[in-house]
Image (cartoon, grey):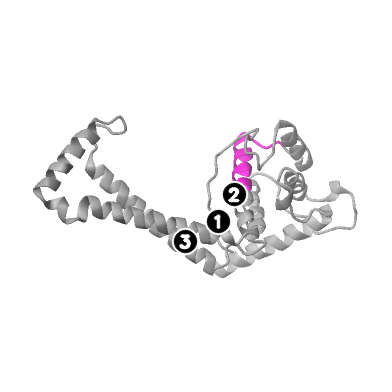
């Protein structure tokens, strides 16, 4: 399974993200189902990985955004290259007029409010170079993601479950119960019940395996098997 590593805004308690609706009352409901209170830092991490799931889940349902992302990245990369060449690699850059033009830019650049006294065209050069490298790296990552089917249906949900387990398993119970001999929700694992409640804070189109808690537990067990197999293959 491909690694997803977006870092959304860290939020504890209520969130203002319209795509993720978790207010104080819902946190209490989630914690009641889980059986334990979630510290603020754990809440924040749960929000972060859930926001990432919502974002990447949309890419699984839409093939078009990937092509648009590549077009935008390539346009940015080309623009950065043209800007760099115009400023530093054109024949005019080393002419007397070019040197004087750079002198004037340097003087006014340092005097601008967005720059400190120790910054100038060298800083701009470094920023343009870093931006160019970042664009190239992003294009490479996007190509690798496409080749490895990062946005294959189901990957985002499996990755979300994996990340939730990673957040909780260090200090809180995560084990998913194997026994489904009873239909009572309170016989399911705390983690399954946490995911059950958390999913009802998601947009409807992002929810998975909500026919029953038992069906959700089966899906979580399957996701764990996929994650464990991926770890075994990497090792």
Position of the C terminus by quadrant? bottom right
| Mark-to-mark CA distance, 3 and 2 | 17 Å
Give how far across and how far down residue 49 sits, in percent. Answer: 60, 47
The residue drawn where x is 85% and y is 49% is 187
Q: Is residue 44 magenta?
A: yes
Q: Of helix, strand and loop, which mostly describes the magenta segment? A: helix
Classed neighbour count for the residue bearing mark 2: other residues with Cα under 10 Å, few (<14), some (14–19), many (≥20): many
Q: Which mark sits nearer the N-terminus, 2 or 1? A: 1
- Label 2 sits on residue: 52
The mark lying in front, picked from 3 and 1, is 3
Q: Which mark is residue 141?
A: 3
| Mark-to-mark CA distance, 2 and 1 | 8 Å
Is 167 left or right of 189, judged from the image as shown? left
Q: SS at mark 2?
A: helix
Q: Which mark sits nearer the N-terminus, 3 or 2? A: 2
Q: SS at mark 3?
A: helix
Position of the N terminus by quadrant? bottom right
Q: Which residues are magenta?
A: 37-51
Q: Which mark is residue 4?
A: 1
């Amino acid at each position: 399974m491909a690694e997803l590593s977006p870092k959304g805004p860290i939020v504890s308690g209520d969130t203002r993200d319209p795509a993720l609706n978790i207010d104080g009352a819902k946190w209490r409901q989630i914690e009641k189902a889980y059986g334990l209170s979630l510290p603020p830092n754990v809440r924040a991490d749960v929000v972060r990985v859930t926001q990432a799931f919502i974002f990447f889940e949309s890419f699984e349902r839409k093939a078009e955004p990937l092509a648009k992302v590549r077009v935008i990245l390539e346009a940015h990369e080309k623009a950065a290259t043209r800007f760099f060449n115009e400023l530093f690699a054109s024949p005019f850059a080393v002419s007397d007029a070019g040197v004087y033009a750079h002198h004037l830019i340097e003087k006014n650049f340092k005097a601008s409010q967005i720059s400190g006294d120790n910054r100038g065209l060298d800083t701009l050069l470094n920023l343009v170079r870093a931006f160019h490298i970042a664009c190239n790296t992003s294009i490479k990552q996007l190509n690798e993601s496409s080749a490895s089917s990062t946005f294959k249906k189901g990957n985002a949900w499996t990755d979300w479950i994996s990340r939730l387990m990673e957040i909780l398993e260090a200090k809180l119970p995560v084990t998913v119960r194997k026994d489904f001999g009873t239909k009572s929700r309170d016989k399911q694992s705390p983690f399954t019940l946490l995911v059950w409640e958390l999913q009802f804070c998601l947009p409807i189109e992002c929810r998975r395996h909500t026919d029953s808690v038992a069906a959700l537990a089966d899906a979580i067990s399957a996701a764990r098997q996929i994650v464990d197999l991926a770890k075994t293959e990497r090792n």
